[in-house]
Image (cartoon, rainbow, N blue to C red):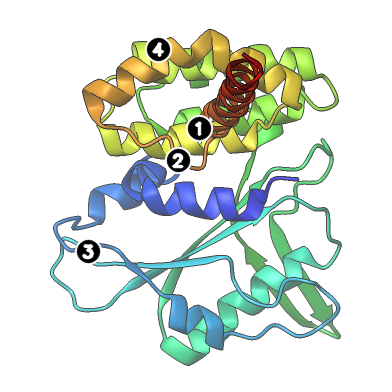
Amino acid sequence: MPDYDHLWKKIITDLFEEFLLFFAPNLYEMVDFSQPPGLKEQERKKISIGGKSKHRTSDKLIGVKLKSGEERWVLIHIEVQGDREDDFPKRMFQYYYRILDRYDQDLYTLAIYTDASPKFRPDRYYSQFFGTELTYKYNIYKILDQDEKELLISKNPFALAILAGLYLLKGKNKPIQKYEYKKKLLRLLLEESDFESEKIHSLLMFIDNILELPQEESEKLTEEIYPLIEKEAFEMGLSMEDTSFARYYKKLGMEEGIEKGKKEGRDEGRVGCT
């Protein structure tokens, strides 16, 4: 199975400006991107969440500086939530108060729900005990709810990542449909987009790995789409490493090499007989 958590984290990191513009345009306008966003990996590792959840650290913490010139950082907490967990809202609150207590930083908090459950969409943590009440509300984004047509006309590169997530849900246990979705996304990316080569490469890797196909369908798609990929790779210097396309052609090359070796062996045998 693909490591979906890793794939989402990487595409968010690679396309962070586009990610922020897609989800929080008002915040995006306040950020000074001449100061590179900083991954808060060390801070993230120090934030421990107890309990039974398999998640013990926040998925993504990124620091940004504002155009106002203030020295304070806005820490952005991003949760890619693929598996339904009943204690998720509490965990989101724990991240918030521990970051606030330890670093005294404001948070833009977003939970991206990548699951297939229409009813799972918690957006707040609520607690009360004899007149003492607490409500913590956070931003949510449900991929299952998104309109395919709106994503297709978006000029934001991150919309293609969301489309890939939506197609993953729609194509579950439907390899032929997933095949068509993947082919459609690759053509959109390589033929119709005018994104920078780095963004195309990141999205190519994301789409290829998140929409993983059975071997037979994967090889068929490679044969169908590879001329286009080869052209783009040559013109833009794209690397095909760690993709199904590279793996297929490496395998093909090995098979051709083995067959060539066998043929040469047979030829030598015939020469020896004479």
Residue 66 badge? 3
Q: Which residue is mark 4?
A: 228
Residue 246 badge? 1
Q: Earlier in the sequence, mark 2 or mark 1?
A: 2
Between the C-alphas of marks 4 and 3, the distance is: 41 Å
Q: Amino acid at mark 1?
A: Ala
Between the C-alphas of marks 3 and 2, the distance is: 36 Å
Residue 22 percent location from the top left of the image: 41, 38
Residue 117 percent location from the top left of the image: 84, 39
Residue 18 badge? none
Q: Amino acid at mark 2?
A: Glu
Contact, mark 4 vs mark 2 (Cβ under 8 Å): no
Contact, mark 3 vs mark 2 (Cβ under 8 Å): no
Say which residue appears at 74% left-offset and 78% top-offset.
Answer: 133
Q: Quadrant of residue 234?
A: top left
- Sort mark 4 into few (<14), some (14-19) or many (20+) by Cα contacts within 10 Å: some
Label 1 element class:
helix
Q: Amino acid at mark 3?
A: Leu
- Sort mark 2 into few (<14), some (14-19) or many (20+) by Cα contacts within 10 Å: few
Name the residue nearer the viewer: 210 or 79: 210
Between the C-alphas of marks 2 and 1, the distance is: 6 Å
Between the C-alphas of marks 4 and 2, the distance is: 16 Å
Image depth: mark 4 or mark 1 in front = 1
Say which residue appears at 86% left-offset and 86% top-offset.
Answer: 130
Say which residue appears at 41% left-offset and 40% top-offset.
Answer: 202
Contact, mark 2 vs mark 1 (Cβ under 8 Å): yes
Q: Amino acid at mark 4?
A: Leu
Contact, mark 4 vs mark 1 (Cβ under 8 Å): no
Q: Is residue 153 visible?
A: no
Residue 238 percent location from the top left of the image: 32, 33
Name the residue nearer the viewer: 264 or 127: 264
